[in-house]
Image: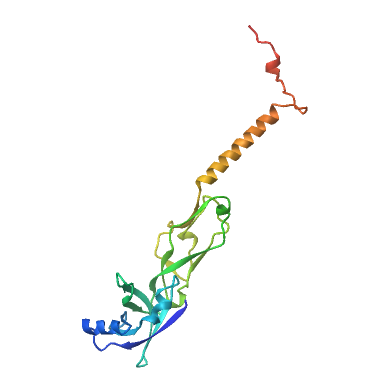
Amino acid sequence: MKSITINGSKRESVGKKATKALRNAGKVPCVLYGGNQPVHFSANELAFSKLVYTPSAHTVVIAIENGETFNAVLQDIQFHPVTDKILHIDFYQLFEDKEIALNIPVILNGSSIGVKNGGVLRRNSRKLRIKALPVNLPDSIEIDIEPLKIGDKVCIGDLLNENYTFLHSENTVVCQIKTARLAIVDEVEEDEEGIEGEEGAEGTTPEGTPATTDAAAEPAKE
């Protein structure tokens, strides 16, 4: 998984006044959990743009000005309800020998046969939660939808991987190709045309004149 480095400074005070002063200075107060004790620090708001405003998942290297570094993942983020400015971020520290649960984006590759035939692609999940060691965390979960026909679907059971564990049941549907109303109408019209064509072939002779059957040629018996 790709990593982003955040350069920060330890916070000497965590009170409301100190927090407000940090925000006024264009910095974001943060807390790193998961270690022996929480680490309070702050960083420039612009430093989080590649981490927050992206659909991709990333790990984070938090580099404190005193020389300390921590590997982490974003755990929670708070935005201002009006301005959407970042108010606070929580991180969770990573350890090489400890598994971590994380939401990973789902990427669908290709154009399915079913969609080309008039079906509709339905995405049930844009992110999937997995559990893995930090070294095995993927950037994304990619699914090849090229061979999917109308009525086909992809479930968690189709995506099992030895590097990580899905925190969903195996029958959870990730995406599927549904039948569109237009596709149903086209199918019915094609069937009707086929039937009319067969009837026309049976009802004419090679010369194009109406054919008579044995039953029609015989007089009705009283």
Labels in figure, total: 0
Q: Can residue 39 be seen in this view?
A: no
The image quadrant of residue 173 is bottom left
Q: In this view, does 216 lie above or below 114?
A: above
Question: For residue 9, what is the image quadrant?
Answer: bottom left
In the displayed image of the protein, which residue is found farthest to the right? 207
Front residue of 1 and 97: 1
- Toward the viewer: 183 or 44? 44
- The image shows residue 21 at horizontal and vertical percentages of 26, 84
Q: Residue furthest bottom?
A: 66
From the top left corner, tell me how far across and down residue 94 is, in percent.
Answer: 38, 79
Does the rendering let one see residue 146? yes
Relative image position of residue 144 (x, y in whole percent): 55, 62
- Which residue is found at the position 39% from the left and 65% from the top? 167
**Residue pictured at 44% horizontal, 63% vertical:** 126
Measured from the top left, where is residue 119 in percent x and y?
53, 51
- Quadrant of the frame with the C terminus: top right
Q: In this view, does 1 lie above or below 69?
A: above
- Residue at the image point whose x is 60% and y is 38% from the top: 191
In this image, 128 relative to 205: left or right?
left
Name the residue nearer the viewer: 71 or 203.
203
Specify whether 94 is left or right of 196: left
